Amino acid sequence: MDMLVRLYDLEEMIEANKNLSDVRIRRAHAPESPVILGWIEEHFGKIWRGEAAAALARAPSTLLVAHKGPEILGFACYDTTALGFFGPTGVGQAARGKGIGSELLYQTLKAMRGAGYAYAIIGDVGPVEFYQNRIGAILIEGSDPGIYRDMLFSSDMLPITPD
């Protein structure tokens, strides 16, 4: 199921996380592709790597990366499978529960608003409550399986699920 997010009143929904002062969140650059895509495939699988590759191929990139020094902690993309879509997004196992995912979400949605979008679609949502609570996202009825129907992939491409 897909979800819809209003971007024009985003500030009202965002709470700044002051505990992330040592974490940098920024747009990724094309020369970083081998490192970032390798990390994404290792942690989340080949399908998400493919979508992230599309984001890194854009100029400017539509992939935001969270890192602490040279260590990648997470990423978020937009405009990968379709224009106006947020995701995929993921945070490495060791970095979860620290607010990095929320901050990646907020920064990516702000970038989408800056690109001219009034709304964002979160495709094939996993954690519905997370998006409802953080940004007031609403379910789009009749959106399952949505844009992802009839995808061609092999079983070794399935997303890796967290333990």
Image (cartoon, helix red, strand yellow):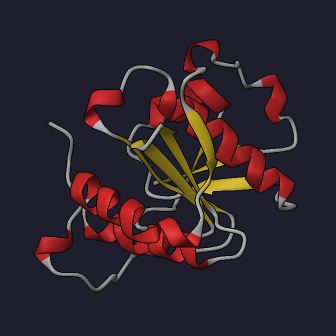
Q: What residue appears at the point 70 percent right and 46 percent down from the top-left corner? A: 109
Q: Position of residue 30 (x, y in %)?
A: 56, 72
In this image, 150 relative to 14: left or right?
A: left
Give the residue at x 20% y 40%.
162
Residue 63 occupies quadrant: bottom right
Tell me the residue at 27%/70% (across/down).
46
The percent coordinates of residue 154 (x first, y second) are 16, 81
Vertical placement of residue 140 versus 132, above or below: below
The percent position of residue 6, horizontal first and vertical second, equals 77, 44
Q: How many marks?
A: 0
- The answer to whether residue 137 is visible is no
Image-quadrant location for residue 55: bottom right
Position of 26 compared to 113: left or right?
Answer: left
Give whichever of 130, 102 is nearer the camera.
102
Q: Quadrant of residue 23?
A: top right
Find the residue positioned furthest to the front. Answer: 69
Where residue 157 appears, as percent x and y from the top left, is 20, 72
Is the N terminus in the top left, top right, bottom left or bottom right quadrant?
A: bottom left
Residue at (12, 74) in percent of width and height: 155
The residue closer to the viewer here, 137 or 62, is: 62
Q: Quadrant location of the C terminus? A: top left
Whether residue 50 appears in this view of the structure is yes
Q: Is the residue 139 above or below the residue 134 in the image?
A: below
88 vs 83: above or below: above
